[in-house]
Amino acid sequence: MLNTFKKFFIFCGNENKKKFYLSIILGIVKALGQALQIPAIYIIVRGMTEGKLTSGMILLAFSILIVGILLQIALGGKSSMLQTEGGYTACANKRIEIANHLRYLPMGYFNNNSLGYITSVTTNTMEGLADIATRVVMITLQGAIEAGLLVLFLYFFDWRIGIVATSGMVLFFGVNHITQKCSSAMAPQKVKADTGMVEQVLEFIQGITEARNYNMTIESNRKLEDAIDEAEKTCIDMELKFVPILGVQAWLIKMTGVAMCVLSLKLCFEGSLNMSECIVMMIASFIVFASLESASKFSALLRTVELSVDKANEILEIEEMDIRGENIQPNSYDINMKGVDFAYNKRKIVDNVSLKIPEYNSVAFVGPSGGGKTTICHLIARFWDVQSGTIELDGINVKRYSMDALMQNYSFVFQNVYLFHDTIANNIRFSQPHASIEKVKEAAKKACCDEFIRALPNGYDTIVGEGGASLSGGEKQRISIARAIMKDAPIIVLDEATANVDPENEKELMEAIQSLTKEKTVLMIAHRLKTVRYADQIFVIDKGKIVQQGKHEELMQEEGIYRNFISEREQAVSWRL
């Protein structure tokens, strides 16, 4: 239990940890305010049993009660507010920390970890920690502290009753230890079930079009329902296993109160405890463990809290790429690869590749799918670090650049464009958030998308759906190009940028690409003849190696993959129904 508290407070960071500690201190003072009930009751009961109750004694007792109540109200509210601020601020900061951390992880991480897992950690896990976990930790901790203070207070009345109360607490925490062990066994199952449910929800939403196309909606629904049923079953199993143990904890608390009452009466009959003290001790037996009883109901969730913290830390502990380079501004944009090897896990994707790309040249990478074309471009932009060999920009190893300084030199247009759920203008000005609308429109005109944007209901202020779902593929591509034009980076990477575009949009898209790539160093991955034939240099990639290189006319004179590739495309274009 103590380890969980420690881990949670470290996770929340120093500033928020201070808020929790202050909340605990205020909770202790609040507990003292609650403990003032006992002397107040004692004054009244003693005055009544001895027949000496005066208005002064009544006034004193009520004054003590009022002070105690005011302390509980004032400090309880402040304590709760500190807990709320600490919990939500800590998890908001942790989300930002995870997001910043993800920026500098190798792209391979995202291949090996599902979107559902990352989404589950940054949404469900963080939300649970901000809301439920904070309450679980603080109620459990403060309940134990308050009960301990009240038990300590009993020793001032009678040490024997204090020992009984202490024994009850020891037994309670003994059973609670069993609860924690049971929770340790169940918590991973709950976390797994929750993550699985999020993954299936995302898969269902993202794949609903394909499911309908192949008449697999029922099967898709069944997977989602199974995941929800599994999460439900896990939660019910946890409750059923914890209820008997929590019942034993509650029974121990009640029986400790009964034992305190019995002992108080026994001592009173024996004459070692006067009547007023006996009555007060019997009343105290119903008060002293109230906070501990509340804490016991939450303590079973402590292990889940610990696992949630571990899940977030697991992402943060993944080794980042070394981004602590220099803020170098290259004088030229020549790119060199020297003897580069790269593998995903143990499968080699790039095998001893060396190439030179002079600045302001356009190069095309062609070849069979899975040959390593995209990986080479990503290595040049340092999406991954090479396992051997070097990649240089302006004769300087890319590892010497800070990541942000390096990325300033690249713009990307991918096959699958992602637009944010925001206005079209804000999507275009993504790299320059404060750019004027005039600059946005200028970029849009160059990207041949101004006309269709102005035709939309709200023009540049039109909100696009998440991922750009409300726009066609060609429209998204042109907005993506406008975004790249706004960045105005000297090196452009086009990754199958025209692959999914219909013929009606292709002419405008090619014009947009020409505007984007004017006086730039261009790396393109493409399968279309129009895209590659005018490249200054063509690299044919197969099985991670450069098997051919040269201009279009030179490669067409050679037997090999490129000529076959072009022939197949020409035959496909000439085919008619």
Image (spheres, grey):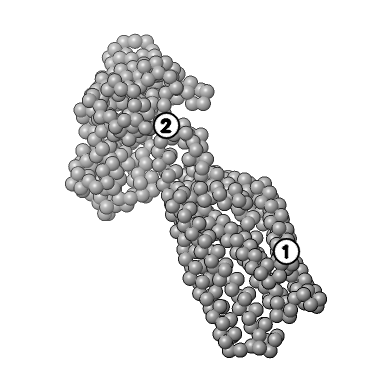
Residue that appears at 65% across and 79% down: 42
Residue 321 percent across, percent down from the top left: 42, 31
Residue that appears at 51% across and 22% down: 347
Q: Earlier in the sequence, mark 1 or mark 2?
A: 1
User: Does residue 242 appear in the picture of this structure?
Assistant: no
Residue 235 lies in quadrant: bottom right
Dot 2 falls on a residue whose secondary structure is loop
Residue 490 percent across, percent down from the top left: 25, 30
* Image position of 517 (left or right of 188): left
Residue that appears at 46% across and 49% down: 13
Residue underneath mark 1 = 163
Residue 74 percent across, percent down from the top left: 48, 71
Question: Tag 2: residue type?
Answer: Met
Do residues under tags 1 and 2 come within 8 Å of each other at their CB atoms?
A: no
Residue 525 percent across, percent down from the top left: 35, 26
* For residue 234, above or below residue 145: above
User: Does residue 269 appear in the picture of this structure?
Assistant: yes
Residue 566 lies in quadrant: top left
Bin the neighbour count of mark 2 within 10 Å (Cα to Cα): few under 14, some 14-19, many 20 and up: some
Question: Tag 1: residue type?
Answer: Ile
| Residue 321: numbered disc | 2
Dot 1 falls on a residue whose secondary structure is helix
**Which of 145 and 92 lies nearest the eye of the viewer?**
145
* For residue 154, above or below residue 412: below
What's the CA distance linking mark 1 and mark 2?
A: 58 Å
**Which of 336 and 282 lies nearest the eye of the viewer?**
282
Residue that appears at 70% across and 86% down: 50
